[in-house]
Image: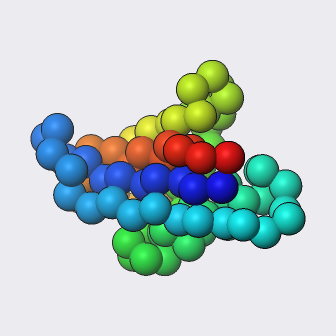
Amino acid sequence: MRIWFKIFKDNHLLQDTVIKDDSEDTRTHKIFHALEQVCYEFDLSKPIWLDATVAEFKRHDKARFYQDNFVEQIEFDFLEIHVIEE
């Protein structure tokens, strides 16, 4: 599985990375581990999965984490997660 993480501010891509996970873990665990890894890499607090975020991710294999998803103040508009390969 490959998951692409992107940080945007004012419609400009500031940072991005792809996390690859070939483990035998469940899909959900792979996504949570990748999110944890990217938060460490980008020096972010872990975002909260709100109901709207979960619904968007289930529908499109893609979701955006806005300020409402973070406890701390963020210096960007949103963090996007996108599953690009299962």
Quadrant of the image occupied by residue 17: bottom left
Image x and y of residue 59, in percent: 63, 22
State left or right for residue 73 relative to residue 5: left
Q: Answer whether residue 67 is visible to the viewer in this image.
A: no
Give percent across and percent down for residue 4. Answer: 46, 53
Relative to the observer, which residue lies in front, 85 or 30?
85
- Residue at image x 15%, y 45%? 12
Q: Decide: is 19 above or below 61.
A: below
- Percent position of residue 72, x then y: 41, 61
Is residue 83 positioned above or below 32 on the image?
above
Could you tell whether 14 is left or right of 32 in the image? left
Residue drawn at the location 45% of the way across and 39% of the way down: 64
- What residue sits 31% from the left and 53% below the top? 7
Does residue 52 appear to the left or right of 18 in the view shown? right
Q: Nearer the viewer, residue 45 or 54?
A: 54
Q: Position of residue 34 (x, y in %)?
A: 60, 64
Whether residue 66 appears in this view of the structure is: yes
Is residue 21 depicted above or below 54 in this figure?
below
Number of numbered discs on residues: 0
Asked where in the image residue 5 lies, by quadrant, the reply is: bottom left
Judge whether 33 appears above or below 61 on screen.
below
